[in-house]
Image (tube, rainbow, N blue to C red):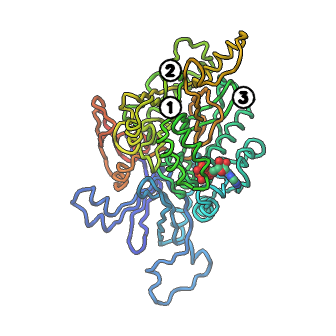
Amino acid sequence: MEKQAPLLCSELRVDRRLYEVTLNSMVLVWKDTQTNKKHIGRSGYAAVKAGSHCVPVCEIIAVQEKEDESPSKDNGKWQKVPQSPADSSQLAFTVFYVKRTRQHCWQCSEVTFHCSEHSICLLWLQSIREQLGLLTNRPKSLLVYINPYGGKQRGKQIYDHKVAPIFSRASISTDVIVTEHANHARDHLKTEADLKKYDGVVCVGGDGMFSEIMHGLVSRSQQDVGADENLTEEPLVPCKLRIGIIPAGSTDCICYATVGSNDPVTSALHIIVGDSQPMDVCSVHSEDRFLRYSVSLLGYGFYGDVLTDSERKRWMGPARYDISGVKTFLSHRYYEGTVSFLPAEGNLGTPRDKAQCRSGCNICRHSVSDKLLNKDEESVSDAERPGTWTVIRGKFLAINAASMSCACPRSPKGLSPSAHLADGTTDLILVRKCSRIDFLRHLLRHTNKSDQFDHSFVEVYRVKQFRFSPRHLECESELDLRENRGSGKHFLCQQRACGCMASRSNWNCDGEILPHTAIQVRVHCQLITLFARGIEEQPVFEDLYAHSWLDGPYVLSCPIKNYSPSSPANKKLIYLTSLWMRHNQFLEETNLHLVFG
Ligand SMILES: Nc1ncnc2c1ncn2[C@@H]1O[C@H](COP(=O)(O)OP(=O)(O)OP(=O)(O)O)[C@@H](O)[C@H]1O
């Protein structure tokens, strides 16, 4: 392994202390020279932890020259009056960078380095800017949509005060549109927006606003290539532009699941550093007509009823979800119907394994290569794949399809803790008719550590496509057949010999009510990409971040045969591997070795 030569190395002052500052193409490191001397002879870890800082170049936001107001210069003595502006300034430069805080939150931190000479200062500015210029994944121009009425109606304020200043620091140009009505952003994206001008689209709002933007962008991408969204078998074209979410809604599940927090500054920083997180999108059709796209939850029965009831109580604000939840639980309605699905094949894990989708997820990474291999297969119609569908008939309290964990602050594990963001599947959860107390036990498991699928009345499958047909429609079609044969009148469902429940639920499609009960759902692998990197394994990162990446070597061994994703050593390995994938030779450059044994 070759250790990378530093591009620059100088002794610079930060406040009153002298630091050895080193830049290579991967990291900027500054080590307190005094601390290092003091700790000579002690363990490397203590010395490094006490006085060293390391920032990956890809997490530097910007670098700016700064008037040198160093305290040591202001010593009360007479000083030479500067002859030119260059003499008085540019003896210091400030680096703005990502700093991790608690709960996956990021901050924009800064450090100012004071140089002894103007030429050294210029050299540092130029070198860091050159390295930043090589990062081609960063957006330069963004189209921003703000929903001024989302959540607590603070979208505009959040953008103006927290986000716009850091975008401008990172030299990102923006066109901002404050929406005037529902679907304004969707329709603008679909028909008017000159998308060639931008490197990404930013949504300031909640999940409903994100859904608008996603619909606009996906539909526009299909229109541009002449793909027909109404055809269920049509392979959809992935969107070229990435979407950034600045959370400002009452529900920010998508942001929470892809970044790990709902903090606007954290999301803005993920956009600036140009992170990419691909995401699956489900298309929902009814009778061969396109209805909607979904990225998180499709729920019939319990979650459909909660949403339907809560929509009538909008005036209550966010409390409506709790009230409707309790009311729906007490009503304990079940629905009859037939679910058929196409199970996922290959190494895509199962909904009950413990492999959670995290930054650099292996399962999602493999799915994209499988997708490329099976490109032709995607266009094969269901009819041409006989015998692969599984059919289940029954009475269900809830039918849920979770395309991501659906974790949120209320339910930290989510509806399907091991669901993946970008593996081309959705986790189909069937909760059969059971007693109220059993259903309550199942619901409570969304909030604790127990396995929520470990009940006899709950079944869960990882699927690529599914269909649902409610019993009342099946009865109607049976009846239609009889009527067509001239048998007579139209009866109400309750009066039928079949005795099935006439009641029907609605589908909850990412928080929107769908007016159709019989639907066909198909997962489109990695159809969109967000400015995010998935949830990082944080404790490991903090641990490693305290080390200087230029020191080492650090050796990490992992007995692959006894691999268990939850063990601390293996979490570290997963994390490092994801970093390595993201920054190519980052680990190699920094002399950090992975030993597989
Ligand atoms: N200017 C506007 N006026 C009214 N509605 C708007 C406007 N802009 C966007 N919307 C709609 O507001 C809905 C809710 O927005 P958003 O998701 O940002 O907030 P929210 O508080 O999280 O809402 P919800 O919890 O209902 O999803 C979206 O479905 C969006 O279509």
Identify the mark at residue 39; answer none if there is no mark: none
Q: Is residue 476 above or below residue 451?
A: above
Which residue is at 24% across, 62% downward? 40
Badge nearest the viewer, 2 or 3: 2
- The answer to which of marks 2 and 3 sits earlier in the sequence is 3
Query: Where does the N terminus fall, quadrant-wise?
Result: top left
Q: Is residue 535 left or right of residue 512?
A: left
Identify the mark at residue 334; answer none if there is no mark: 1
Badge nearest the viewer, 1 or 3: 1
Would you call the spot at circle 3 few (<14 residues within 10 Å), some (14-19), or many (20 or more)? some
- The answer to which of marks 2 and 1 sits earlier in the sequence is 1
Residue at the farthest left position: 41
Badge nearest the viewer, 2 or 1: 1
Q: Nearer the viewer, residue 217 or 164?
A: 217
Q: Secondary structure at mark 2?
A: strand
Identify the mark at residue 393; answer none if there is no mark: 2
Would you call the spot at circle 2 few (<14 residues within 10 Å), some (14-19), or many (20 or more)? some
Identify the mark at residue 227; answer none if there is no mark: 3
Q: Amino acid at mark 2?
A: Arg
Q: Amino acid at mark 1?
A: Tyr
Q: Nearer the viewer, residue 491 or 444?
A: 491
Query: In this view of the protein, can residue 59 be seen by the observer?
Result: yes
Q: How many marks?
A: 3
**Gap between marks 2 and 3 measured at Cα:** 34 Å
Q: Secondary structure at mark 3?
A: loop
Query: Where does the C terminus fall, quadrant-wise?
Result: top left
